[in-house]
Amino acid sequence: MLDKNDVLSTVQMIDRQHLDIRTITMGISLLSCADRDAKAACEKIYDKITRYAEGLVKTGEDIEREFGIPIVNKRISVTPIALVAAASETEDYVPFAVALDRAAKAVGVNFIGGFSALVQKGMTDADRRLIAAIPEALAVTDLVCSSVNVGSTKAGINMDAVALLGRTVKAAAERTADCGGFGCAKLVVFCNAVEDNPFMAGAFHGVGEPERVINVGVSGPGVVYHALQSVKGQPFDVVAETVKKTAFRITRMGQLVAQEASRRLNTPFGIVDLSLAPTPAVGDSVARILEEMGLEICGTHGTTAALALLNDAVKKGGVMASSSVGGLSGAFIPVSEDEGMIAAASSGALTLDKLEAMTCVCSVGLDMIAVPGDTSAETIAAIIADEAAIGMVNTKTTAVRIIPAPGCKVGDTVEFGGLLGSAPVQAVHPYSSADFIARGGRIPAPLHSLKN
């Protein structure tokens, strides 16, 4: 039974501490849409998405109004399109992205994810066609998000794919140069991608998932920050317990919304992703949580340890609140989407190298980072390889969402607006990685991958 104080506390978290449901994401399997005729396949995709998701936005709005819980985004994830399009006799996969975009607009969602390929051990012809289509697909659509999984702990890292994605990121930036390389903000390169992630731009509906499913992503950096203000100067044991209790309450709210959306949409409930996903709004920052632990500024010495504590405590608290925790779950550190991260990066305290170190202990990886527009494709590929290696060796999901901002140099700022915020352009090492990337082949899986 709900205690009156719990209700009042939750109301305060929503009204004053930026607590929200970041997304209700409906996952939809498109495997049944495969067809030799690409045009027919695209029509099947449009029809299936609009049929399954026609009530998604209204249901989210109804729950938001009735329960008083803000639901920021309603989204769709679909089967990796490389798998669906493989049956079609066409070289051009851009029309598949256009069909996704058209369907997403028809049902009114904010984003649709799944223009994706899984190439951790090798690339099929369909995978190559999809990757080749990414720059154009992201340029001609508004709501489509793309991802490619280039490595895993079990398979190692596909360095041919890494090199190709370095060039793809550059091409996506150039193709959307008129808006600061915005296409790259909708492209994620993964290692150990998960099949039930509700967060964009990396969401896709895995082949092990049901026909359709509801996944919910919660947020709440502001709530955690506020909670830590009550334990100033106390030992880290107390800090960890405080974060755990707060994450428990946040996840309970996510579970309630997920189950209600599942019931109303007659769609199975999948998971609650309890990631602390920040926004550019003041008071909704992961960086400020770390600073509340005693750091003068995010990025200084001690930042990685503070983030490790935060990530672990969030997971422990969330797991106690729901038996269906999944997705990525932890703390995100997207630079452009976090007011405190933007300030730290602009001051020079938070560098690309420090961000890479932080990704060893947080959810996902190098996220929404702007670099100079003249950064080479090989350097971008090498950054992807470094991050994939962290994921592979540590058996965790890592990713890179990087924007080589056309015409920009270190010190400039790229404005994206909305939840994507603004990104200060950060320096990369001036030394070449070209010969390293040119080797190609595959970095073998680590010894501890042999667990069978």
Image (cartoon, grey):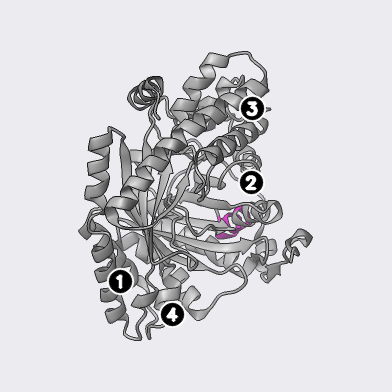
> Which residue carries the number 2 mark?
429
Q: How much space separates mark 4 and mark 2, taking CA atoms?
A: 39 Å
Q: Give me the residue at 30% from left, 71% from top.
A: 45
Q: Earlier in the sequence, mark 1 or mark 2?
A: 1
Point out residue 246 in the picture as x, y percentages from the top left corner.
50, 28
**Magenta segment:** 376-383
Majority SS type along the magenta span = helix
Q: Position of residue 33 (x, y in %)?
A: 34, 76
Q: Residues within 10 Å of mark 1 (few under 14, many from 20)?
A: many
**Residue named by callout 1:** 45
Q: In the displayed image of the protein, which residue is found farthest to the right?
A: 447
Q: Is residue 381 magenta-colored?
A: yes
Pointers 2 and 3 in contact (C-beta within 8 Å): no
Where disc 2 sits, the SS reads loop
Element carrying mark 1 = helix
**Residue 325, image x, y percentages:** 51, 47
Q: Which of the marked residues, 3 or 1, is nearer the chain's N terminus? A: 1
Rate crowding at label 3 as few (under 14), some (14 to 19) or many (20 or more) other CA atoms within 10 Å.
Answer: some
